[in-house]
Image: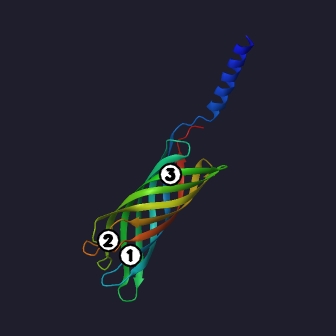
Amino acid sequence: MRCLIAVFLFLGITNTVFSQVEFKPYAEFGVKAGASFSNMFLEDRIGDEPFVGSLIGGRVVYLGEMNFGILFETNYSHLTHDDEELGSLSYSYLHTPFLSRFRIPVGRTAIVINLGSYVQFVMHNDDQVVLERDALMGLAGGLEFTFPVGKLSASVEGRYNYNLHSNSTTIDDLWATWAEVGLVFSYSNRKR
């Protein structure tokens, strides 16, 4: 009889302990705003030139595991460069990253590592800016610091992007790179 009581107590304690850490998948929906800093090539110039601009977008995060998920964003960026010879130059694009997301909890906050790929669709570019392809693909990676703000969560994020092929259809080595910094506010459908 004692053995049976001990088994029931053990099962009850085990069930209580594991039910407290049971994870249920959830999604987050957010908006993002920030700045982009790129190195872009100009016609008949050796080397790249710095462009700076703003970005705005939306995101969906799905966490299927406690600390691992996926992130999909759609961002719009408009960047400019003031040139002594050519005047004010600009280009804009729609950027759609699809990233894996590894979350490291630190109390009520978290450090997040985002890694993956993207497709970038050119929306507009001045003739002097070398963007001959309508779509570019590349790799992206970054860090994010997430913290609660009332019922929402806020994140400060930095990300680096690298095109996998040349911006030009005739010159092979004109790869563009750019960095982003942003602030994200997200709402979670997580049941607490």
Q: Label 2 belongs to which residue? A: 167
Q: Secondary structure at mark 3?
A: strand
Disc 1 marks which amino acid?
Met
Residue furthest to the bottom in view is 85
Give the tally of numbered discs.
3
Crowd class of label 2 (few under 14; some 14 to 19; many from 20; radius 10 Å): many
Farthest left residue?
Answer: 170
The residue positioned 41% from the left and 80% from the top of the image is: 49
Cα gap from disc 2 to disc 1, whole angstroms: 9 Å
The residue at the point 38 percent across, 76 percent down is 40
Q: Quadrant of residue 191?
A: top right
Residue 107, image x and y in percent?
67, 49
The residue beneath circle 1 is: 40
Q: Disc 3 vs disc 1: Cβ atoms closer than 8 Å? A: no
92 with respect to 115 (left or right) = left
Query: Residue 149, can we see it?
Result: no
The residue located at (56%, 42%) in the rendering is 66
| Along the viewing direction, whichever of 145 and 15 lies nearer the viewer | 15
Q: CA distance from mark 3 to mark 2?
A: 28 Å
Kindly identify which numbered label has been placed on residue 101: 3
Q: Sequence-wise, which precedes: disc 3 or disc 1?
A: 1
Helix, strand or loop status at disc 2: loop
